[in-house]
Image: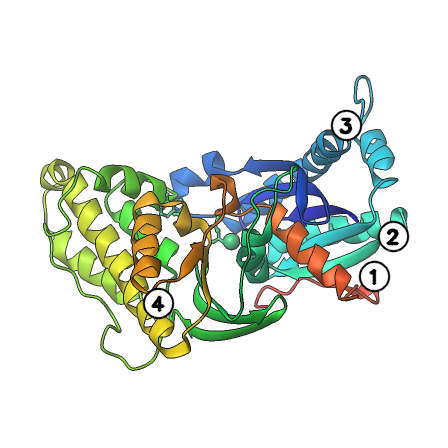
């Protein structure tokens, strides 16, 4: 089954071509340069950028994935030729930014109708979960993922612990009540004057910093449930440094980054560890943009080892952050289950989609 996958839920315009769950091509046009000066994603700017980029991104994914000759051809011609070889279109329906989602959803509807293709609508979080099932064009990596699997997904938009009984069978057992883990890192980065996205820059600075420099809370640590809260952490960080002169903040950037990052990661791990004790899964999985962080990956591997469990995380860096490969794989499994969109004309984005 050849799949064209489209993802526009936030600030990446992404398309990929897959053969079942194997990636044949992966194209991402990041909008970081457009949003960084605002310290976060600006919806109107994201919408316009998605609209401008979606056709060239799809054409490039089809060209690369299907080895099409593109010299002297218009974008529409490349897409027309590529679509002949596509069986299914998979698109992110939500959750995400409404006006950004609309761009991908409308384009996928247009293509499905014009080229008479089947369409599957994918939940973005399911995409992150199934990023651990993505394979390269040589069918690697080979993974035997046993169920039940317990997954930690942490990104700019979500922080969830999900119990998976199978592909397609999910139960959210813990989640953030306010900000997501990545969002907390992004907000701390903004407070420190370090720009957006915060995760990668905080990771780089934290390497040389002292995690004990500033004592910060671990919100919800003692709550019985498996839920998270990150907005209080950000607020206490803000009050701790708000009266510091800029020079003092700048002198201590590494230590501040290390202390804040450590508080976020410890919070993530406290609840995930608790969830492992409660649900006794056979496998652990992690996904989402925050898993690009090597320190967090190291700590998760240790948690798995302590519990004599296998842990799988996305095998390439660009599979952690938003991408269309994971949407293609989630779409593949939905297509196998026959879950196609029945009335394509009426399909509408679902910014608050639940998994
Ligand atoms: O999955 P993603 O691309 O988008 C959402 O679905 O939200 O995640 C983006 C988030 C941002 O908050 C970003 O700061 C964070 O992932 N992130 C990282 C790293 N790279 C991206 N956080 C920690 N360390 C990183 N290396
Ligand atoms: Zn995401």
Distance from label 3 to label 1 (Cα)?
Answer: 31 Å
Q: Nearer the viewer, residue 97 or 90?
A: 90
Q: Residue at x 37, y 68 (%)?
A: 178
Q: Is disc 3 in contact with disc 2, using a CB cutoff of under 8 Å?
A: no
Dot 4: few (<14), some (14–19), or many (≥20) neighbours within 10 Å?
many
Distance from label 2 to label 1 (Cα)?
Answer: 8 Å
Distance from label 3 to label 2 (Cα)?
Answer: 24 Å
Query: What is the x, y in percent for residue 160?
Result: 44, 66
Question: Which corner quadrant of the image does residue 96 belong to?
Answer: bottom right
Judge whether 241 appears above or below 163 on screen: above
Query: What is the x, y in percent for residue 256?
Result: 17, 47
Given this view, does label 3 or label 1 mark the residue nearer the observer?
3
Judge whether 235 appears above or below 59 on screen: below
Residue that label 3 marks: 67
Image-based side of 337 in relation to 203, left or right: right
Query: What is the x, y in percent for residue 139?
Result: 64, 42
Circle 2 — which element? helix
Dot 2: few (<14), some (14–19), or many (≥20) neighbours within 10 Å?
some
Q: Earlier in the sequence, mark 2 or mark 1?
A: 2
Residue that label 4 marks: 272
Q: Is disc 2 in contact with disc 1, using a CB cutoff of under 8 Å?
A: yes
In the rendered structure, find residue 135 and report the number of the disc placed on it.
none
């Amino acid at each position: 089954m050849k799949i064209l996958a489209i993802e526009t839920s936030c600030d990446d315009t992404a398309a990929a071509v897959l053969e079942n769950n194997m990636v044949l091509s992966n194209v991402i046009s990041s909008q970081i340069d457009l949003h960084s000066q605002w310290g976060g994603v600006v919806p109107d700017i994201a919408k316009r950028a998605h609209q401008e980029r979606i056709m060239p991104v799809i054409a490039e994914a089809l060209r690369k994935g299907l080895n099409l000759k593109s010299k002297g051809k218009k974008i529409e011609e490349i897409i027309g030729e590529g679509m002949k070889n596509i069986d299914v279109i998979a698109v992110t329906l939500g959750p995400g930014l409404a006006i950004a989602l609309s761009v991908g959803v409308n384009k996928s509807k247009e293509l499905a109708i014009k080229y008479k293709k089947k369409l599957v609508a994918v939940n973005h979080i399911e995409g992150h979960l199934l990023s651990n099932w993505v394979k390269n064009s040589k069918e690697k990596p080979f993974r035997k993922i046993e169920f039940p699997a317990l997954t930690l997904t942490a990104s700019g938009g979500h922080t969830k612990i999900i119990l998976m009984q199978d592909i397609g069978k999910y139960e959210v057992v813990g989640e953030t009540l306010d900000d997501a883990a990545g969002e907390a890192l992004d907000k701390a980065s903004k407070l420190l004057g370090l720009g957006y996205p915060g995760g990668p820059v905080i990771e780089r600075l934290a390497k040389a910093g002292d995690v004990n420099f500033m004592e910060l809370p671990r919100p919800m640590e003692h709550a019985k449930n498996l839920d998270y809260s990150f907005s209080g952490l950000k607020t206490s960080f803000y009050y701790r440094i708000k009266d510091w002169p800029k020079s003092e903040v700048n002198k201590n950037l590494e230590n501040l980054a290390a202390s804040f990052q450590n508080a976020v990661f410890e919070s993530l791990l406290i609840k995930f560890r608790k969830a492992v004790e409660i649900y006794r899964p056979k496998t652990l999985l992690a996904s989402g943009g925050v898993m690009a962080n090597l320190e967090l990956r190291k700590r998760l591997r240790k948690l798995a080892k302590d519990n004599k469990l296998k842990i799988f995380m996305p095998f390439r860096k660009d599979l952690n952050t938003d991408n269309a490969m994971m949407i293609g794989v989630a779409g593949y499994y939905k297509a196998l289950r026959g879950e196609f969109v029945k009335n394509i004309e009426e399909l509408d984005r679902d910014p608050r989609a639940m998994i």
